[in-house]
Image (cartoon, rainbow, N blue to C red):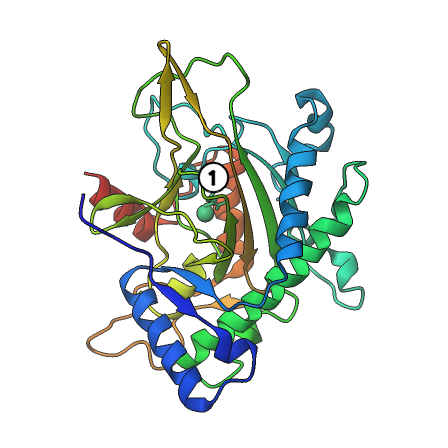
Amino acid sequence: MSTFEVPTVDITPYVAAGTTAEKAAVAAAVDAACREVGFIQITGHGVDPAAADGLASAIDDFFALPLETKKQWVRPAAENRGYTAPKSETLALSLGVQSETRMKDFFEAFNVGSAASDYPDIALLAEHYAENTWPEIAGFRERIDAWREEAGRVARTVVAIFDDALGLLPGTIEALAAHPIEVLRMNNYALPDGTTVELDEDFIGMGEHTDYGIVTILWADQAKGLQVLHGGEWHDVSPADGALLINLGDLTTRLTNEQWLSTLHRVKPPIHVVDGIGTIQRRRSAAYFFDGDAEATVGPLPGFVDDAHPRVYSDVTVDEHIQAKLRGSRAGVVNTDAAREADRVLNALS
Ligand SMILES: O=C(O)CCC(=O)C(=O)O
Ligand SMILES: [Fe+2]
């Protein structure tokens, strides 16, 4: 396997009022990373380590509950909220690709997100802004909300960097996010004691997918499992101490007319065989999806279509795009509107 590293960018100049030249250097590094990889490790983000500790402990508290208890918080497939039990979602269907033999993804998750009650004065498309339900765990909501606050701030900083990196007027991308769909998905990759893992290729924590929105802010354990597709090969990625990962979503690919690509990734924890029984090391992550306003229309931005770069996507609303993805991953309805993303998967995997 070729050596591969996710580029690291220190975004301090954007967090702590750096000089114009310092910011330009950050924007140039982000542009290069987005053109080449689509995943970046960011440092200098200014997130209080106590917020990350609170997130991690809240994840531990919730997933330690018995399965039957957690199932109280399962929500309808159309609402991207609440508990997802192991083997109930299939991320590869969000792209419209799936091997027939593969078992469903074994991750379990708990999702919270921006709710209609956060924006009482605006009529919103209800499904994307469903109210949250919270488990009865002391301080759970407070710890999660503290992390959401930090992740939201980082997302807005990152899109300001994107404007500069793409040569756009300040505020161009943020104009799509006045009341964005923002979902925090906390993922737990673990197998009940005594589970025998079959050592086949189709054992998957979370199937290959691109994220759907503008950008994702990802907190993750250092345990192996996350893999990013680059140069036709899957590469293991884990964050350095205190670093966050960010990755581009499909809406940014559409805005840039594919100058920047949403990167395919999956979670495939290594299997350790002890006495003939395969086990995995438990791994946690929390993906904060910054997805834009549901009713916003997304197509290539001015300046991204010319003779050398013909328009490759028609306009879509954030609502239509995200709904088609969620019908795939959460309701098992193959997304047939993701032909370009699916092609990228199939070309890479063949
Ligand atoms: O677990 C991870 O590191 C990645 C999770 C992910 O890709 C997602 O939730 O979309
Ligand atoms: Fe993802």
User: Looking at the picture, how far across and down is residue 314, in whole percent?
Assistant: 38, 64
Percent position of residue 293, x then y: 60, 64
Residue type at mark 1: give it.
Answer: Gly
- For the residue carrying disc 1, how many other residues have a C-alpha within 10 Å: few (<14), some (14-19), or many (20+)? many
Which of the image's four quarters has the N terminus? top left
Q: Is residue 137 above or below residue 142?
A: above
Q: Place residue 335 in its image quadrant.
A: top left
Q: Can I make out residue 71 in this image?
A: yes
- In the foreground, 283 or 302: 283
Q: Which residue sits at x=66%, y=55%?
A: 51
- Looking at the image, which residue sits at the far top? 275
Q: Which residue is mark 1?
A: 328
* Residue at left offset 44%, top offset 74%: 162
Instruction: Answer left or right for 65 relative to 199.
Output: right
Q: Secondary structure at mark 1?
A: helix
Out of 333 and 130, give the one closest to the viewer: 130
Q: Tell me if residue 193 comes above or below residue 18 in the rendering.
A: above
**Image quarter hosting the C terminus:** top left
